[in-house]
Image (cartoon, rainbow, N blue to C red):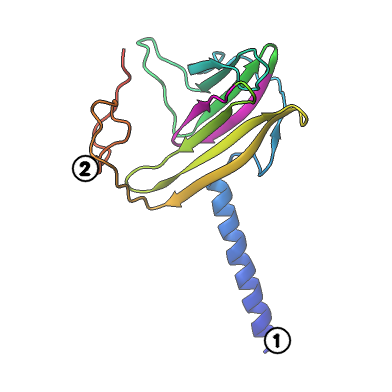
Amino acid sequence: MTIRSARGAVLVLLCACAGAEDRTAREPNTVQPDTVVRKADTGPLGIGGTLLDSATVDVDGDGTPERVELGVNAGRDERGEMNWDVHNEWSVIVRDGPDSYPLLRECCPGAAAFWVIAADSTGPAAILVQTSNLTTRGGGTRLDRFVWDGSRGGFVRTSRVEGWGTAFYRGPPAYTKLGDLLPPTSWRGERVLEPEP
């Protein structure tokens, strides 16, 4: 009886470890709960990659705007088309003068994006960083919230929301006046969204 119990315990432990390895494979970001992202030497995003977009906003509440950049390690070909790979490294970096704070440096099969939710004049802004490979067949998405904390010397991740698995999307009718804020329920990934010129 003791041998069967021991075998059962080992089996349970192996299954738990296998599940942990699978979760780690899906979620390679090294940011942990309540992690402080301190300044690091990141170099410019344009070297060996592409700066896709940026926003200049006072994110730390000091009265001087910082630059938040979104980039990927994929380059463009001679026609200007992106040379995408299966797993590109996405970056969201806050540039404060000579200092850089890498909120995201992660390889993922999907894409990344950020939002800056500007605060009033009394505090820092919130930066929301999303990674997603979510499609109508499945995948996952994660949204992290970062806020500057001068006493801790960096951007603190204050919360995380994520989901992985089979996806069932239901959305409102298309908002034509708001530029398709959310895709309607009838959208199933058939159309390719092109950036506006």
Any part of residue 103 in sight: yes
Q: Earlier in the sequence, mark 1 or mark 2?
A: 1
Taking the spot 54% from the left edge, 34% from the top edge, the residue there is 107
Q: Which residue is mark 1?
A: 2
Location of residue 128 with respect to 59 vertically, above or below? below
Q: Is residue 127 above or below residue 144?
A: above
Question: Could you tell whether 37 is left or right of 50 in the image?
Answer: right
- Quadrant location of the N terminus? bottom right
Residue nearest the observer in this picture, 19 or 97: 97
Residue 138 position in % (x across, y down): 38, 48
Residue 54 higher or lower than 23, as above or below: above
Alpha carbon separation for disc pair 1 and 2: 57 Å
Numbered range of the magenta stretch: 100-120
Q: Residue 10 shows which numbered tag? A: none
Estimate the x, y position of residue 16 in percent, counting from the top left.
60, 63
Q: Which amino acid lies under the numbered mark 2 shown in the image of this protein?
A: Ser
Task: Name the main secondary structure of what is drawn in magenta.
Answer: strand
Residue flagged by tag 1: what amino acid is it?
Thr
Left or right side of 72 for 65: right
Q: Please give the residue where the numbered disc 2 appears in the rendered image.
A: 186
The quadrant of the picture occupied by the C terminus is top left
Residue 27 can be seen, yes or no: no
Residue 37, image quadrant:
top right
Q: Position of residue 102 (x, y in %)?
A: 63, 26
Task: Label 2: state its secondary structure.
Answer: loop
Magenta span has 119? yes
Residue under the point 61% across and 71% down: 12
Judged from this view, the residue extending furthest toward the bottom is 1
